[in-house]
């Protein structure tokens, strides 16, 4: 695996992909890698892509009161894990490499960026799209991989690329949505799980139990009630709703909807979701 910290090093490493005539698969991450990230890498490898993983904790997608300072940073371990996984390039840039003093396009997430995660974390999606757009410009992937746990992020990235391609602003990038990876209890894997206090883990696990319970009910009201009934009293619920999976508009019917949930467990904020009709 080639490790690139600068854009010059990245370009040099990418030239070897060009030389082999391989298409580039990109997995953007903020590090503290877990089996969920590795499932994205595996998917890219199954498609015989030259795999680039980025590790960059993007300050612009953390708001006031968010956990930027406490966000786990484990680059040494991440690099070893990615080497073992057979990744071709690890791009781990500094802040100044990603955000030079000028020339970085600010992307607005628009109306969808103000719903749910966007309402709870103002500016989060603008910052996320800005960095993803910047990383796409640097890596120039053919295919990019995102986990379905961050379902709203996935829709926003897909829409951004679609818009840019339609405007002739970029070459097409295929956005691949990958299934959420869960531990044996059902808890969705997240880098933030590392920060859940051991005694609060059983409470955190009720987030996915709630989704499972809700998904078995035929009406929206029954679905939300069943889900809430599963939540441990130590969970501080931010939102639970049924939404249209493409627009994140609230819907009244379970059929074809996505149940989304966000909650705090101690200091850690977790999100999860389920496409009704089966796990996604
Ligand atoms: O999902 C994440 O880890 C981040 O939002 C991403 C896509 C790497 C952008 O910083």
Image (cartoon, rainbow, N blue to C red):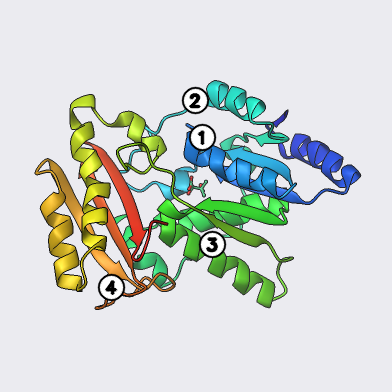
Q: Does residue 266 appear in the picture of this structure? A: no
273 relative position to 232: left or right: right
Tag count: 4
Compared with 226, 185 (above or below) is: above
The local crowd at label 3, few if under 14, some if 14 to 19, many if 20 or more residues have their Cα within 10 Å, is many
Instruction: Kindly identify which residue carries mark 4.
Output: 254
Q: Secondary structure at mark 2?
A: loop
- Could you say where residue 100 lies in the image, as x and y percent from the top left? 63, 45
Q: CA distance from mark 2 to mark 3?
A: 26 Å
The residues tagged by marks 1 and 4 sit, at their Cα atoms, a distance apart of 35 Å
Image quadrant holding the C terminus, namely bottom left
Mark 2 touching mark 1, by CB under 8 A? yes
Q: Secondary structure at mark 3?
A: helix
Q: Residue at the far right: name it.
A: 19
**Quadrant, the N terminus:** top right
Q: Earlier in the sequence, mark 4 or mark 2?
A: 2
Give percent across and percent down for residue 62: 39, 46
* 3 vs 4, front mark: 4
Residue beneath disc 3: 157
Q: Is residue 58 left or right of residue 122?
A: right
Disc 1: which residue: 31
Comparing 70 with 144, the one in front is 144
**Which residue occupies the foreground of this view, 97 or 153?**
153
What residue is drawn where x is 54% and y is 22%?
A: 77
């Amino acid at each position: 695996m080639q490790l690139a910290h600068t854009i010059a090093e990245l370009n040099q490493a990418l030239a070897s992909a060009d030389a082999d005539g391989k298409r580039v698969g990109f997995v953007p991450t903020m590090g503290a890698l877990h089996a969920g990230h590795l499932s994205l890498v595996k998917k890219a490898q199954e498609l015989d892509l030259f795999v680039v993983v980025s590790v960059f904790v993007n300050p612009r997608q953390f708001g006031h009161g968010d956990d930027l300072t406490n966000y786990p940073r484990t680059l040494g371990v991440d690099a070893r894990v990615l080497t073992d996984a057979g990744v071709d390039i690890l791009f781990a840039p500094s802040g100044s490499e990603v955000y030079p003093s000028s020339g970085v396009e600010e992307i607005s997430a628009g109306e969808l960026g103000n719903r749910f995660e966007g309402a709870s974390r103002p500016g989060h999606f603008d910052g996320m799209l800005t960095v993803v757009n910047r990383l796409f410009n640097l890596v120039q992937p053919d295919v990019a991989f995102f986990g379905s746990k961050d379902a709203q992020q996935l829709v926003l990235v897909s829409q951004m690329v679609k818009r840019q391609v339609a405007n002739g602003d970029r070459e097409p990038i295929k956005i691949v949505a990958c299934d959420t990876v869960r531990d044996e209890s059902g808890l969705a894997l997240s880098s933030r799980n590392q920060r859940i206090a051991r005694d609060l883990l059983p409470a955190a696990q009720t987030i996915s139990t709630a989704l499972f319970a809700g998904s078995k009910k035929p009406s929206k009201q029954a679905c939300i009630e069943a889900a809430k009934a599963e939540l441990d009293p130590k969970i501080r619920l931010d939102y639970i709703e049924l939404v249209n999976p493409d627009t994140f508009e609230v819907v009244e019917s379970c059929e074809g909807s996505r149940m989304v949930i966000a909650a705090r467990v101690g200091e850690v904020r977790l999100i999860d979701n389920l496409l009704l009709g089966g796990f996604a």
